[in-house]
Image (tube, rainbow, N blue to C red):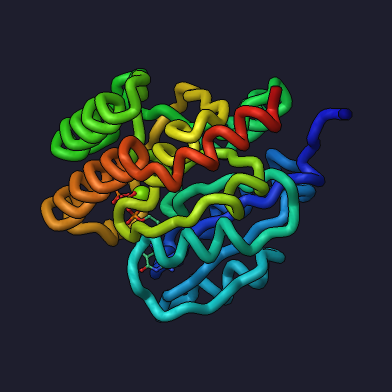
Amino acid sequence: MSDFTFDDVAVVMGTYNEEEAIGGVLADIDRVTDGRAEVVCVDGSDDRTPDIARGMGATVIEQEPQGYGVAVREAVLTPDRPIVVTTDCDDTYPMERLPDFLDRINQGYDVVSGDRISPGPETMPLLNRLGNRAFAALASLFLGQRFHDVTTGMRAYRRELLHRIEWTENTGLSAELLMRPAARNYRVAELQIEYDERAGETKLDPFRGGAAIAKSICRIGIEERFDTSLDAVTTTDTVERT
Ligand SMILES: Nc1nc2c(ncn2[C@@H]2O[C@H](COP(=O)(O)OP(=O)(O)OP(=O)(O)O)[C@@H](O)[C@H]2O)c(=O)[nH]1
Ligand SMILES: [Mg+2]
């Protein structure tokens, strides 16, 4: 089969009052993909974010703000294109690395996950850095496979797996989007990426959000290890692939 190009890619994101950042993020996507990637924003803003996004050619789906995962689940399930890339809309993730994510997919990976932690991101607040390292260690223990960053917002996925797995988490959705495919033997690769300082206000309370993520990781880890009804999926996927 021939390689995927940016004509096969949708870049999706939740957007919540990101008027300071969205113009730059969408301009970067446009420049790097030569205007070929589709862009989908699931938006809960009461500022100018959706107008800016529409003006720049993005598809905007309006949704009451209900948290990160509710928005991002809708965002990843919307596109018809075979490759779906997630990002945050706060100008922290390097859109110029989109070609590297696509290259890894074309090498045969099902999920390519941006690892912000291994390069030692100076721009990430210390508390977030420590928390994210702890989340990665905890998830790795459950999965029996070492991951360095399970809470990253920038990943590429084959669309098919996004529709095959049931997603249940909100604040913990980013960890779930890595853990369930990894536990079910999909091919998951990490790719080291740079991480920038956030433009605009954070939408996450670090303590409440952190506790919710830790709980999600434990719940998903236990479910994927011990729920035998999920094992059937693993077997089918493995058989289909070989
Ligand atoms: N539609 C929608 N988008 C949301 C909601 N909560 C967060 N987002 C978006 O989801 C993305 C991630 O939120 P952030 O505030 O950046 O969370 P974070 O990356 O964990 O925290 P920072 O370190 O502050 O960047 C951003 O693009 C937000 O605009 C929500 O309730 N609804
Ligand atoms: Mg962010």
Query: Which of these two is toward me, 140 or 224?
Result: 224
- At a point 71% along the width and 65% down the height, the residue shown is 57
Q: In percent of the image, x 77 and y 50: which residue is there?
A: 35
Q: Quadrant of the N terminus?
A: top right
Depth order, front residue of 26/59: 59
Residue 145 drawn above or below residue 56: above
- Residue 77, percent from left and from top: 59, 60
Check the image and report above or below for 34 versus 185: below
| Number of marks in picture | 0
Residue lying furthest right in this view?
Answer: 2
Locate residue 157 relative to residue 9 in the image: left or right. left
The part of the image, by quadrant, that contains residue 83 is top right
Q: Is residue 21 left or right of residue 127?
A: right
In the rendered image, residue 107, in percent from the top left (x then y), is placed at 70, 21
**Residue 129 appears in view:** no
145 in relation to 61, above or below: above
**Quarter of the image where the C terminus is located:** top right
Viewer-side residue, 240 vs 116: 240
Residue visible at 19% across and 31% down?
134
Residue at the location (43% across, 41% down)?
Answer: 180
Whether residue 39 appears in this view of the structure is yes
The image quadrant that residue 202 belongs to is bottom left
Image coordinates for residue 53, horizontal then vertical, percent: 60, 67
